[in-house]
Image: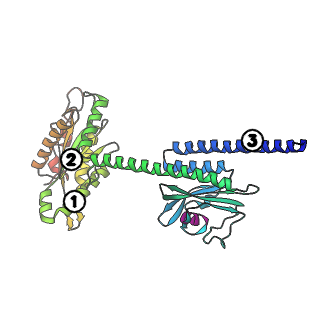
Amino acid sequence: MTLFDGLRLHRRQLARTRELARQLQRVRALLEAGRAVNSARELDEVLQTILNRAVSLLDGTTGSVMLRDGDELLVVASWGNDEAMHRRVKIGDAISGRVAIARRPQLVVGPASSSHFPGLATRGRAVDSAMSVPMIDRGELVGVLNVGALGARVFSADDVDLLCAFAEQAATAIAKTRLYEAARRATAELAYSATHDSLTALPNRALLAERIEDNVRDHGTRHAQGALLFIDIDGFKAINDAFGHQAGDDVLCFVASRIRAVAPIGATPARVGGDELALFLPEGTDIDEIVNVAQTIVSTVRTPVVTSMGEIGVTVSVGIALLDRHGSTYPELMNAADNALYEAKRAGKNCWRLCGPLPTDGPDGGVPRQRRHLSDVSETPYARR
């Protein structure tokens, strides 16, 4: 072997070593990119991580992630071309559309033209080299991953292979994230349906009881404050009998919406029975505010309700029980509020009543505040004459 042959062999060995080192570096980068993608939890985060890593991995300058949406591809993440976001491409059109329908990668060297790729979007400056590869999970097309470059960077077949390998990981990550989000939504929907009434969308009896118990636990039995308002629709059975159950449902939803509208911040409106609703006012609510809320509910409901059977006049009766004074548990409060509601019904309906006398004005046992609010209820517009 001559000296020249030895030098040539040495150069080849150095080149091979550099190429192996480069390939090893790319494999490591690919594994790191895959770990980064799979560590993301939210779909938006996964998509953006896929794009960021892909562009970085291939030394690109632009890129996009497109997800399949029926017979179209939708751009859901973009790099270097904000105008591309939310753009749609028919499967079969442009570069990405052809990749989607053929499920094979596409390497483009030199500016792409619409004459070669019908439906290709125009941009301010065309890239000089581009790759578009399909993202497939378990035989299903998830979307298309695109990376482009400007200037001296020209992609090769090796670059396409690397992007294809990354696209496989990306497709799996997207599929897993979608399954995770679907499971999370299903869990949230189950939790919601277990604690809310399906007709009025108000919290149900179980959630109302939980809110009261939480209030008592947070403040202690002796220091818990607030009130439970028990609300009954007057003559609801007669409405159902005369106009039908659909009209009855319309009335229920109307009353529920009015209660929700006047409920103070932090209060819990609920449906606790057929035509029975409730409103829990939390700690920090004084007696004047409690009475004002009850009066507002009675007055704001007293409006003809437009139902499927025409307008129906509706009124409600309200019974009030004070936390700690009349009970410290949901059953105790509900029993006391029910007794007060019975008194409101006896008084002619379309009014409110408190269970027992109101608290006195001061610690010296002064004039009961009941005289300010209850002695003339029958003379106020909040009681039926």
Q: Which residue is mark 2?
A: 272
Label 3 secondary element: helix
Return the residue nearer the eye: 132 or 12: 12
Q: Which residues are magenta?
A: 95-101
Binning the other alpha carbons within 10 Å of mark 1 as few (below 14), some (14 to 19) or many (20 upward) gives some
Q: Say whether residue 300 is left or right of residue 49.
A: left
Mark 2, other Cα within 10 Å: few <14 / some 14–19 / many ≥20 = many
> Is residue 216 a member of the stretch shown in magenta?
no
Instruction: Please state the horizontal and vertical placement of residue 204, each as a whole percent of the image.
Output: 25, 46
Furthest-bottom residue in this view: 115
Whether the residues at callouts 2 and 1 have beta carbons within 8 Å, the answer is: no
Q: How far, Cα to Cα, is label 2 from label 3? A: 76 Å
Asked whether 58 or 291 is in front, the reply is: 58
**Residue 150 placement (x, y as % from top left):** 72, 57
3 and 1 marks in contact (CB < 8 Å):
no
Secondary structure predominantly adopted by residues drawn in magenta: helix
In the picture of the structure, the residue carrying the numbered disc 1 is: 249
Image position of 364 with respect to 43: above or below? above
Marks 2 and 1, the one that precedes in the sequence: 1
Taking 96 as reference, is 202 above or below it?
above
